[in-house]
Image (spheres, rainbow, N blue to C red):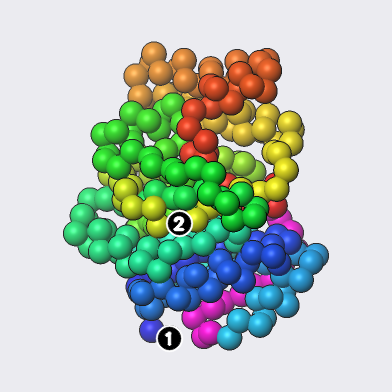
């Protein structure tokens, strides 16, 4: 089989209402030389039927017992064959030019190994509620990274060589697995975001559970502490590692204020 230019990794759990549109948005890209790898992580709804109804040789589907987002994404990465690996969540949509624009940028900037984009954020009805414009250049991203996750997970494209060099997603992170990966990739590669809004990110219905939010805060603290301990940031940046732990004792409204720009933490599926 011919090696594609881009592999797109997707994991889905009970995503029947949205996964069809997500996959079709990838198969309809102006960059046609791609493969879409979908790991159905134990769905109990109509997700398998929705995926089976999409007839395209570039779509590769693997169904397995549920093991969680992190392990599902790593399985997709194991199957990916392209030198560039992209992400899209099963409830999001990539605009037609997204992959072509990212590939063009990476071809022109060989030192960049991790590239995201801006995004539009919509509610379950499709109404726009926010525009996400993260920092675009390497210096600004590094300043932001110790404070918050300055990337939209669903918009990311990575060089396979850089990804393999740091070991993909860490299975010990059930949440914030993307934040941990970006921090590790920042040790060995330059970072960038395209300013264009090339992804539509759908907010899940309802609110994130208190337990899940606590897990996220602890994971963020762990990521930042690792970065300080490895000397990627000066010792005084330990204050940013302590901030999520301190937030656990605060009311939810105060937590949201400390959290920073909405949508910059990545978007796990099924929660």
Q: Residue furthest left?
A: 108
What is the magenta range? 56-68
Query: For numbered disc 2, what is the local secondary structure?
Result: strand
Residue at point 61%, 75% (across, down): 61
From the viewer's perspective, tell me whether residue 184 is left or right of residue 65: left
- For label 1, count other residues whose C-alpha is less than 10 Å away and answer few (under 14), some (14-19) or many (20+): few
Residue 156 vertical position relative to residue 61 in the rendered view, above or below: above
**Residue 201, horizontal then vertical, whole percent:** 53, 52
**Residue 125, horizontal then vertical, whole percent:** 64, 55
**Residue 175, horizontal then vertical, whole percent:** 62, 41
Q: CA distance from mark 2 to mark 1?
A: 29 Å
**Residue corresponding to mark 1:** 1
On residue 149, the disc is none
Residue 58 within the magenta-colored segment of the rendering: yes
Q: Is residue 73 visible?
A: no
**Residue corresponding to mark 2:** 199
Residue at point 39%, 13% (across, down): 236
From the viewer's perspective, tell me whether residue 87 is left or right of residue 268: left
Q: Is residue 109 visible?
A: yes
From the viewer's perspective, tell me whether residue 213 is left or right of residue 138: right
Residue depth check, mark 2 versus mark 1: number of the one nearer the observer: 2
């Amino acid at each position: 089989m011919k090696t594609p230019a881009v592999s797109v990794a997707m994991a889905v759990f009970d995503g029947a209402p949205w996964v069809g549109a997500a996959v079709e948005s990838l198969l309809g890209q102006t960059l046609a030389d791609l493969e879409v790898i979908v790991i159905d992580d134990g769905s109990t709804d109509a997700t398998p039927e929705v995926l089976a109804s999409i007839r395209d040789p570039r779509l590769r589907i693997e169904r397995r017992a549920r093991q969680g987002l992190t392990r599902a994404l790593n399985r997709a990465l194991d199957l990916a064959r392209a030198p560039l690996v992209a992400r899209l969540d099963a409830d999001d949509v990539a605009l037609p030019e997204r992959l072509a624009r990212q590939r063009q940028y990476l071809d022109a900037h060989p030192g960049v190994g991790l590239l995201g984009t801006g995004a539009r954020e919509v509610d379950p009805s499709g109404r726009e509620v926010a525009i996400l414009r993260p920092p675009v250049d390497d210096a600004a991203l590094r300043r932001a990274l110790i404070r918050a996750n300055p990337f939209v997970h669903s918009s990311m494209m990575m060089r396979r060589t850089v990804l393999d060099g740091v070991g993909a997603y860490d299975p010990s992170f059930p949440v914030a697995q993307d934040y941990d990966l970006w921090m590790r990739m920042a040790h060995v590669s330059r970072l960038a975001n395209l300013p264009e809004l090339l992804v539509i990110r759908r907010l899940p219905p309802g609110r994130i559970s208190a337990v899940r939010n606590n897990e996220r805060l602890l994971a963020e603290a762990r990521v930042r502490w690792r970065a300080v301990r490895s000397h990627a940031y000066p010792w005084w940046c330990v204050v940013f590692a302590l901030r999520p732990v301190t937030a656990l004792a605060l009311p939810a409204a105060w937590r949201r204020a400390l959290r920073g720009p909405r949508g910059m933490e990545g978007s796990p599926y099924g929660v």
